[in-house]
Image (tube, rainbow, N blue to C red):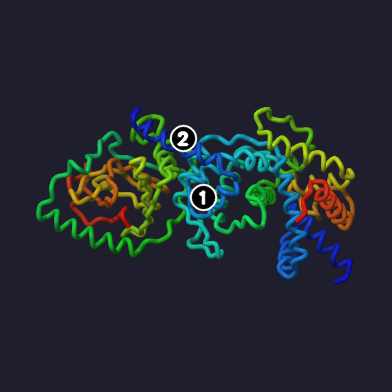
Amino acid sequence: MTDRDREELEALAAAGALDALDDEERAALEAARDADDGLDGRANEYDEVAAALGAAAEPVAPPPAMRDALLARIAQTPQVRADGATPAPDAPEAEAAAPIHAAPVTPEQPAPAAADAPRGGPAQERARSRWGVRAATAVAAVAAASALLVAGIALGGGFSGPAETPESVVAEISAAPDARRQSVQSSDGATATLVWSDELDRTALLVDELPALGDDETYEAWVITDAGIAAAGLFAAGDGVTVHLIESAPAGATIGVTVEPAGGSDQPTTEPIIVIPTNA
Amino acid sequence: MGSAMLVLVRPESETETTATAATPDALLVRVGAGDQAAFAALYDAMAPRVLGLVRRLLVDVAQSEEVAQEVFLEIWQQAPRFDAGKGSAVSWILTLTHRRAVDRVRSAQSARDRDLAAGHRELAAEVPDPSESVEVRIEHERVARAMGGLAGPQRESIELAYYGGLTQREIAERLDVPLGTVKTRIRDGMGRLRDALGVTR
């Protein structure tokens, strides 16, 4: 390599650190860095210089809603693996501002505690074993959650006060040290994700692209434990992401969703479309 | 409803007390392992700097906030690839931030905004925010001093590139000088900054 070639590569690396290259030049720089450790080391130095320029920019305080929106969103977003493989398609950036929607049908309805659930009779035993089978299938079908899109739009969820919105609760859960999540495909092909924290005792169900129902039907959530099946609130499909907060889901409970007649049912009357175990 | 809020608030504030003591490097490694609480702490530590850098390139407030959100989503997604042996978390994040901001500057929809943003503001011309951290303040002055040590044309080209989001070719057109001249100014200027900032491996 001549000195002139070396100088040109250095100039390429210097401009590359400033993101001042066009696509063709950038590709040339990447190839040259891969092939030349000396150049790569020099380019790393220039990258550090550029980062120092970035660190000198005046900080700007972000709006508080951005934090909630991001924490809710990462709960739904898979990470790359360290080897660089991408486990699931990312959400299109154009949809980044899509609103999160929660549409509780009866927002003030208290969800009965699972401990108060009626002891199961024979019909409920059948129902439970049916759910058990479906739960196993659902676990096998766990797919990486598609990135659900959450923007900083406050929606009155009527969950426990005006200071909370469904997305702020999702954000709180997501930020908890013991936050966990589980995703399944619903029988309609929607991606359903449960996020929960046993420490906070809070659980939220997020469903991407849940089909809207007719006026005579409603979605109903259920908390299934050894004690039985307890109703956990009615909800309707939102535009985009539907969020339903579930109260009093004991550790290890299975969360299910059925389609019920408008007004809801005391016990599920149809096959569940979503079953998410929390002990998997 | 009051008790529900208490339940929500208490564990989070405990988390933040412990997490903010961690460095961005330690936090980013934890984020790479899927730690959402570490992500929250990293966001708190870095969001003002990320948004500040984006705002430096994009005048529009709403667009800047959108880009900053995209940056943090990408931080979450790409964190497993962060290699602490190759550089600091702050550099990794700001590099990613700058790339995203430049992409937005160059996208067609913001083309009409870019003349407004094109790097004409001098580093020292910005009024310091009294609430900014000592660390950022020191960094700001360190870089301002290093930039002050450059020849005027070198500094101009580097500012148009980094803070203006222009390519070398666009800088040559704007300044009406040969492309080779811009390349040389940037290479020499970056070399001097590297020495002045003590960036060597």
Residue type for callout 1: Glu
Discs 1/2, front: 2
Q: Quadrant of the C terminus of chain A?
A: bottom left
Tag 2 subunit: B
The residue to which callout 1 is attached is A95
Tag 1 subunit: A
Height in image: B83 above or below A96? Answer: below
Q: Residue at x 32, y 40 (%)?
A: A104
**In the displayed image of the protein, which residue is found farthest to the left?**
A122
* Residue density around tag 1, few if under 14, some if 14–19, many if 20 or more, within 10 Å: few
User: In the rendering, at what x and y percent does residue B189 appear?
Assistant: 85, 50
Q: Describe the element under mark 1 as helix, strand or loop.
A: helix
The residue to which callout 2 is attached is B13
Of residues B30 and A99, the one nearer the viewer is B30
Height in image: A162 above or below B152? Answer: above
- In the picture, measured across the screen, residue B124 lies left or right of residue A209, that is right
Q: Mark 1 touching mark 2, by CB under 8 A?
A: no
Q: Are marks 1 and 2 on the same chain?
A: no
Residue type for callout 2: Ser
Q: Quadrant of residue A44?
A: bottom right
User: In the rendering, at what x and y percent does residue B121 appear?
Assistant: 78, 37
Question: In this view of the protein, can residue B107 be seen by the observer?
Answer: no
Q: Quadrant of the N terminus of chain A?
A: bottom right
Q: Residue at x 25, y 39 (%)?
A: A111
C-alpha span from label 1 to label 2? 32 Å
Height in image: A252 above or below B149? Answer: below
